[in-house]
Amino acid sequence: MNQRVLDVSGLSHAPADSRALIWWGNLAMMAIEGTVFAMAIATFLYLRMKNLDWPPATVPKPDMLLPIVNLVLLILSGLPALMSDAAARKEDLTAVRIGMALFILAGIVFLAIRFVIMANIGYKWSDHAFGSIVWVVVGLHTFHVLAASGENTLLLIYLFVRPATKKRYLDVRCAAVYWYFVILSWLPFFFFIYVQPWMHRKGM
Amino acid sequence: MSELVINQSEFSTERATLEKTWAPARGVIGWLTETGHKQIGMRYIVTAFCFFVLGGIEAALMRIQLAKAENNFLNPDLYNQIFTMHGSTMMFLFAVPIMLGMGVYFVPLMIGTRNVAFPKLNAYGYFIYVAGGIFLYVMFFIGAGPDAGWFSYVPLSGPTFDAGKRADTWAQMITFTELSGLIVAVEIAVTAFKQRAPGMSLNRIPLFVWSMVVTSIMVIFAMPAVMLDSTYLIFDRTMSMHFFNQSEGGDALFYQHLFWFFGHPEVYIVFMPGLGFISSIVTAFTGRKIFGYTAIVSTLVITGFLGFSVWVHHMFATGLPQLGQSFFTAASLMIVIPTAVQMFCWIATMWSGKLRVATPMLFVFAFFLTFTIGGMSGIMVGSVPLDWQLHDTYFIVAHLHYVLIGGAIFSLFGAFYFWFPKWTGRMYDEALGQFSFWLLLIGFNVTFFPMHILGLRGMPRRVYTYQPGMGWESLSRTASIGAALIALGVLMMLINFAISRRSGVVAGANPWNADTLEWSISSPPPVYNFLHIPVVSGANAVWDAAPDQPYVTGMRFDRREVLVTKTLDAEPDHREEMPAHSIYPFILALTTTLGLAGSIFYAWWFVVGMILTTIAGIGWFWPSKEDVREELRREMAMEAVRD
């Protein structure tokens, strides 16, 4: 009897797109962290419901200039991320390097501005529950910007000193997708720190 | 069926090459670098079982203390620590890790692949889990064992009422174990969706794999809640934050909401793999296709969804709006429907198949009995008026042990006996197995059934002793005797396994004539799992295989290649190369542990830990020269084919 076989020797290796395993790992990572962020938003809403003053009377209305500048910068950093994503698809190494360098740079400037904002925010995490959740949320997001920028820097260095293979282009695409996540996850937090509390200040 | 097995006795050169490619790492350092899913899975199972024994010893100490009124065997402080350690160990260090460990071991085997999707991450998850367990027990033995119960409610566990490091220890243990749980969940979900053997479309996935997939997805959406909750608790305690501090705008009840948003799905995370074991065992022991495959898969998914909408039933006694009570009662009672559908499917399968009875099947019967009783008492505490009466009494202790031991442990022990021949290549001793089974079943009911009555008679849980003349003495003593029977039953099982492992009857590849792919390869499985990746042509892969069942060729034997298939229909899509053994998971686990464990003493340790982890992470990521050369060679070859 002849043995029937399914020959897969013609199949390619690790494509740089959504079929790859690491792409799915990246998605799962974002699902987990997205859940953490959703729970943090639930914390905001729950505490607001339970408090008569929200934010507490001692919290000054924030100066909006730097937070808005930083928000715009973060959103714009999505463009070089898109660029390196598209370039990785075409395996255009130069464009990948430029795109990555730009959004890493944007991340670093973003962190510097955030440092200034938080140094002048006017309350500590130990002042009241509002302070606690704001600092924790900002801390969480900062941690993500920091970690993502660190990983991206490592990847960029690699792309300068070692040959770029398909696997590394896949890494670039995953890094870009993760960066979109870092950008998007800041939007609801921005709303709950800078917009919502001042729309209907509870207790005033 | 046997064709699959016979085919694998040929091809000796290919087998030798595969042996070399996938060889397990040797030596102590090698042990730390291992990334094979069977080794990691077995480590989870063995480690978690050691924690089960520790948790069992703690239970025994409590039963000795409660065997008579006004006993002085344990003082109140130690008793608090012991019941907290018992609950925390059983939930976080035993139940979840052992179930996920079974998944790590069996999912790749059942779907026909060579390793999980992210082997290094998998190894890292195991080390993090062990570190969390060691951390908890080291703290316990130096006198900082947590003492506020396995859910550590604030304000009792808050900075005001729990000085020292006890509650911090508990909260950080949560971070360790949930991190590891999340890692395994991602491994299992991605592996099951992307690496199935060609032909294993969604409607042919073994039910155990389905149950692990649903479990994993529940883990992904449940565990972040408790990680955040326990982190808030640590922040409140160590950094003077106010999440749960009523006087500074925090809210103590919010702790419970976040905890149970995780805690109820957690219960399903623990018993849902058990439902998978039951389906595997029932299929093998009736020798027929399971009745209502689609119904069972849908009810698994429905149970997974419903599990997220019932958490408030743990909080009926906290004063809720009427609508909230009604909603969460209704949602809780609704769980009966999918669970009952599964039960009826299994009963229909047994009814219409040729039922054989051996130890695994006996455990299935025990599961039916005890899980149903637990479900009944669940309906009772699911209704608010009765819950107010029974809250925090021994009735709850009885209920939760009936569902968890009935749902998770009986099915797990059944699974141990069922897969023992696959693990060791030898059969367990049937007579001893049945003897141990009866000890466990009788011991369990003698221990926990009286607790229903104790609860109805008003005995609160978590009291270290009680006065004579309350009507609790004889029932408590009975429970203590039952606990001894359980201990004996577990001991018998271990003795059976220890002896049979060396001198049992040789089992062969498929002693039960079972249907899933792990039975198509030799026992114990070769290190590379499958000589050729199989092609699947039915929901019962082994039974549905034709005499000339096709298999996959064209995979490299000298590289660690796995086949990635399409998510819905499992058509071959591409090949991916798995990483070799690596020491970095262990190093990263060390640095993470330093950061997490240190941070409860001094927050900057977390920063130190993260910096070291980042440095070690470079080594994790940086590909070896040889791998890069191989990648380039491959890409060049592909180009050549294209041109």
Image (cartoon, coloured by chain):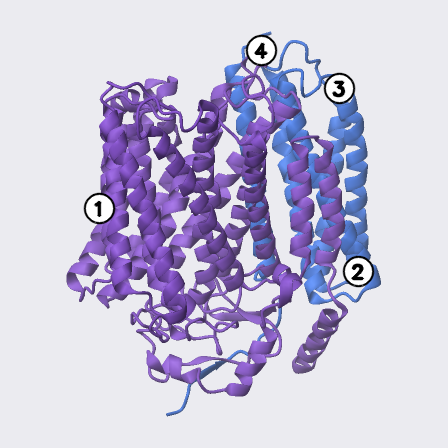
Say if labels 1 and 3 share a chain.
no
Which residue is denoted by mark 1 in the rendering? Answer: B369
Q: Pointer 1: residues within 10 angstroms few (<14), some, or many (20+)?
A: some
Looking at the rendered structure, the secondary structure element under dot 2 is helix
Give the farthest residue toward the front.
B72
The reply to whether dot 3 and dot 2 touch (C-beta < 8 Å) is no
Cα separation, mark 3 vs mark 2, equals: 40 Å
Discs 4/1, front: 1
Q: Position of residue B476 (x, y in %)?
A: 27, 30
Asked whether the viewer can see residue A73, the reply is yes
Q: Position of residue B114 (x, y in %)?
A: 52, 69
The reply to whether dot 1 and dot 3 touch (C-beta < 8 Å) is no
Which residue is denoted by mark 4 in the rendering? Answer: A53
Q: Nearer the viewer, residue A29 or A61?
A: A29
The amino acid type found where label 1 is placed reads Leu
Give the farthest residue toward the bottom.
A1
Q: Position of residue A133 (x, y in %)?
A: 62, 24
Vertical position of residue B396 compared to residue A182: above or below:
above
